[in-house]
Amino acid sequence: MIVVSDTSAISNLLKIDAVDILRLTFGRVIIPDAVYEEICEIQSHSLTLNQLGWIDRVTLSHPPDERALLALDRGEAEAITLAIRLSADYLLIDEAEGRGVARQLGVKFVGLPGVLSMAKKNGHIERIKPYVDRLIHEARFRLRRDLVEETLRQAGE
């Protein structure tokens, strides 16, 4: 399985010391240079990220060239471009604008609530709610209330 990640999934899971959910769910995760640099802006994230042998950093040989990508930040643009170039099974992305562009370009994506749902379904976590609560309160990750309620409802929580 090929999984490319934008910054938010890795960074927010690092903030709550739960980044291993990505390894358990996907095995390996690929990030472009811009995402690596964004994550490393927080020194503790940099130290942890460099110790994770299951996150592969890739340098794009050509910059993103799709017109729709020009409105996005560099990390999102590179992650979407890499997902397209690698024919990724999933792009991990949470920002609405980036998801819209990914959808427009035909990239299959999933956000953190979806990742948590996959992790529970595969038996890697018992419950989603504690992770959602920690993401919201500790990482200050913004999630729409209706999305949280729907994710928990579908998970039987």
Image (cartoon, rainbow, N blue to C red):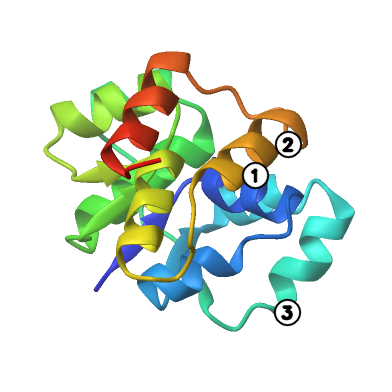
Q: Name the residue carrying label 1.
A: 12
Q: Quick one: label 2, few (<14), some, or many (20+) residues within 10 Å?
A: some
Identify the image quadrant of the C terminus.
Answer: top left
Point out which mark residue 139 bears.
2
Label 3: which secondary element: helix
Q: Which is nearer the N-term, disc 2 or disc 3?
A: 3
Q: Quick one: label 3, few (<14), some, or many (20+) residues within 10 Å?
A: few
Q: Which is nearer the N-term, disc 1 or disc 3?
A: 1
Q: Where residue 9 sits in the image (x, y, percent)?
A: 53, 47
Q: Amino acid at mark 3?
A: Gln
Q: Where residue 43 sits in the image (x, y, percent)?
A: 88, 55
Q: Amino acid at mark 2?
A: Ala
Q: Name the residue carrying label 3.
A: 51
Cα–Cα gap, marks 1 and 3:
17 Å
Residue 63 showing in the rendered view: no
Marks 1 and 2: in contact by CB < 8 Å?
yes
Q: Amino acid at mark 1?
A: Asn
